[in-house]
Each structure stands twice: as C-alpha cells, then as structure tokens.
Image (spheres, rainbow, N blue to C red):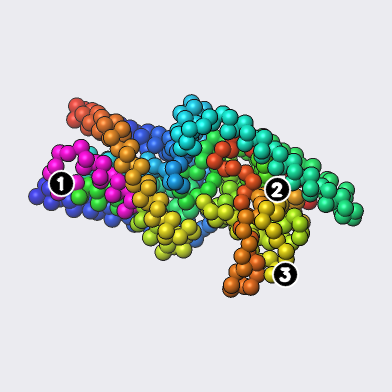
Amino acid sequence: MAIGGRTRSTRGLVILLVVASLVIITVDFREGSNGPLSKLSDGLHSVVLPMQDAVSRVFHPVAAFFGALAHLPSQQHKIDQLQQQVDAGKADQVQYQQALKELQQAEGLIAVAKSYDFTTTGARVIGNGVSNFEWTIEIDKGSNAGIKVDMPVLAAAGLVGKVIHVTPFGSQVLLITDFDSYVATRLEDSQQTGLLQGQGRADMIMSNIALSTKISKGEPVVTSGYSGGLFPSGVPVGTVSDVSVDPTTGDKEVTVTPNVDFSSLDMVLVITEFNGG
Amino acid sequence: MRRGLLWTAVVLAALVLQSTVFAQITLLKARPDLMYLLTVLVALLEGPASGAVLGFAGGMAEDFLLNTPKGITALTLTLLGYAVGMVRQYIASPSALVPVLMVGAGTAVGLMFNGLVKFLLGQLDAGWGYQLQIALLTGLYNAILTPLVFPLVRRLAESSRAKRVFRW
C-alpha cells in the first residue's frame, strides 16, 4: 500500500514537472527575447558569471593542459604565440588591402577613414557556451562598463560576433558561427555583398551572390556596413574556402572560413561606438 | 531543506564547471555534459522522484543560460531522471559497471530525445547526423567520467540522507 502510494505520487510529480517544462517551452517560444523569462535568465546569468570568472581563473591551467592533450603533443604556449602573430599578420594584410582599395575610391575616402575610428572596450573571455548546439562566449564586461546588446565584438584577427545578453558585470556574445548569426558581408575583390550565416562547427555560408560574380578561393571577406547596421564596415571576417551554386535560387553560395580561431579566444574588443552605426 | 540547499549547490557547481573547465575539453566536436551525468547518477542513487526533480532543476538552470527555447533540457532531464530511476529498480547487479553503462546509454538517449523535441519545435539547426554524433560521443565521455564522479555524488547523497534521518 505504502509502496503503491509512493509510486503514484512519483508519477504525479513527474507529470507535474513535465507539464511545467512544456508550459515554459511554449511561453518562451511565444514571447521571444523580451519577456519575463528572459529577465529571469539575465538574473541567473548575473549569479553565475562571477563564479565562472573565479573558476576560469583557477582552472585555466587545468583546461589548458587538457586543451594541449586534445591538440596533441605540442606546447600550448608556443602555439598561442605563433597564432597571435599569424592572426595579427592576417588582420594587417586585410586591413592594408582594404585601405588601399578605399584610397582608390576617392569619393568615400574621408568617410571610410572615419569608419575605422571605433571606440572600443577590452574584455576577457571567461566562459564558453554550455551546450554543443550553441556557439556563444561569456565576457567579463557588462552594462557597468557601458556594454549594450547588439554591440559588435572583435578579436585581433577579425569579427567575433555580437553581444546578446548583458548583466552588470558580464555579457554573452553570439559567435558568427552560430546558426542564429547573420552578418552583412562583402567580398573584397568583387565588392559583392551577401548575408553570411553561421553553420556551427562547419564553415559559414554567404548566400545570394549573383552567378556572374568572379570569386576565387582565399579571397578575403569583410563586413559591409550600411546605415543603421550592427557592424562597422571593413572589418575582416574570413576567407573564401569554397564556391558552389545554390540549385534552388541559381545564385552563388560561398563557404567562408572565419579568421578568428574561436577555440583559443582569450581577449576581445567590444565596439561601443562607431561612425555610421 | 538542507537537502535542497545541498543539491542546489551541486547543480550550480556543475553548471559553472560545465561552462568553464569542461567547455574547453572538446574532442571531435563534443564534450562531456555534467547535467546529464548528474541526473543519471542521482536517479540511480536516490530513485525516480529525486532523479526527476534534480533533472528538472538542473535542466531549467542550464536552459536559462542558453538562448534556445527554455525548458527543452528540463523536459529531457525530468524524463531521463524518472526513467533511469525506474529502470534501476529492476537491476539487481551490484557491478560497478551498472552506473557507467547507465550514464553512457542515458546520456545518449537523452540527447537524442532532446534533438527530437528541438526538431518538433523547428529548432534542430545542425541536422540529425550531427545530433547522433554528439549524443554518442557525449555518452561515451560521460561514461568515462562516471568512475570519477560517482563516488563523489554517492557521498553527497549519503551525507544528505544521514542528516535528515538524524534530525528526524
């Protein structure tokens, strides 16, 4: 009798919890990103972020050790150093070429020079997304440092993503590789623009490019700013790794490898102000 | 009361560790998932009711740190905790392999169920092949972690139970 009663109450409890989950799934699905559930989510973020910060400081050597194991027997430190040099070189190269091109476009000269004039805030990366299905990072600067939702985030090698959640002492950044990330971009040589969508673990895809466009592998892709856009113009994003034709639209589809190595991201810049935004 | 606080702390600790230390241990695109691991272990040790409650709480906590529709992980882990707790009652073997296998299978099945719910909501972005790969690998990694985590969770479970009995 007692056991029977317990089984029944357990079943009732589970049904209750399942219904609660379903209600929350439905409510959240309908209300989008501005409802009370998202506010609650921000609250939890501000509790967990300081802990993440502390833990990531303490465990950084441990994680780096496992990271080194995963990357096979090479010295993490040396890789980091070389990677930084390569990243810096890549960014320099793209920025130089971009500047050169824009010099030739006499008309927009001064305006473009101004568009590189960002106000930025440096931030440390203190955590990665908790699931295998979301590509986000946590940074240690939040609304107290003037960070707001939708601000662009950069690394030395190029575009990282945009801020999607802000708490007083930390923020969450959606990486450009996430499926929900769309960035207006431009092919450097042809100056063709297209929307770049993240593909998770795979390279990003830039679609809706006219079939007649000549595109070569290794061609740099940069952000294309437009009035009211989220990202400033001319920030390096990646390089073309493959070109194919989308059979449904008849447009070209370009696969783009990001410049930034997201697995070894330690410091980022948040653009708090840029001209033309 | 004390028991609730203890398990809340455990869930928070798992969440923080998951997003810092374990977030960086990625092999073949997958990484261990502590919340699945914890849910299965608690269900094994404490039965279906506790498994379901911890799964729900842990899943909610994880969902609220993510962007995807909230509640999917909570739903998955509630059912996972309950199912594992029920299955456990029919396993008499005292073998140490039981928790390892349960964690591996539970995690993989749970993640596939999670993918199914996301699919029904039109949120399965990455495709079934990727989902299956992640589910199997995460199950494997969780199973490997079980011998390390199981004694810890068992000690926590025993201490929480002992205190309650003493107070009564």
Residues tagged by mark 2 and mark 1 found on one chain of the structure: no
Label 2 or label 3, whichever comes before in sequence order:
3
Q: Chain of mark 2?
A: A
Q: Which residue type does callout 1 highlight? A: Ile
Q: Nearer the viewer, mark 3 or mark 1?
A: 3
Q: Which residue type does callout 3 highlight? A: Ser
Pointer 1 local density, CA inside 10 Å: few below 14, some 14–19, many at least 20: few
Note whether B122 is above or below B74 in the view shown.
below
Residues tagged by mark 3 and mark 1 found on one chain of the structure: no
Q: Main secondary structure of the magenta part?
A: helix
Q: Residue at x 55, y 52 (%)?
A: A178
Local SS, label 2: strand
Question: How far is the residue under mark 2 from the one under mark 3?
Answer: 24 Å
- Using the rendered image of the protein, determine whether residue B4 is visible from the camera's viewpoint: no
x then y, percent, for residue A51: 48, 31
Which numbered marker is on residue A236? 2
* Magenta highlight on residue B107: yes
Determine which residue is flagged by label 3: A212
Determine which residue is flagged by label 1: B91
Local SS, label 3: loop
Part of the protein shown in magenta? B88-110
- Using the rendered image of the protein, determine whether residue B152 is visible from the camera's viewpoint: yes
Q: Residue at x 47, y 55 (%)?
A: B69
Residues tagged by mark 2 and mark 3 found on one chain of the structure: yes
Which of A13/B64 is in front?
B64
Question: How far is the residue under mark 2 from the one under mark 1?
Answer: 58 Å
x then y, percent, for residue B67: 50, 51
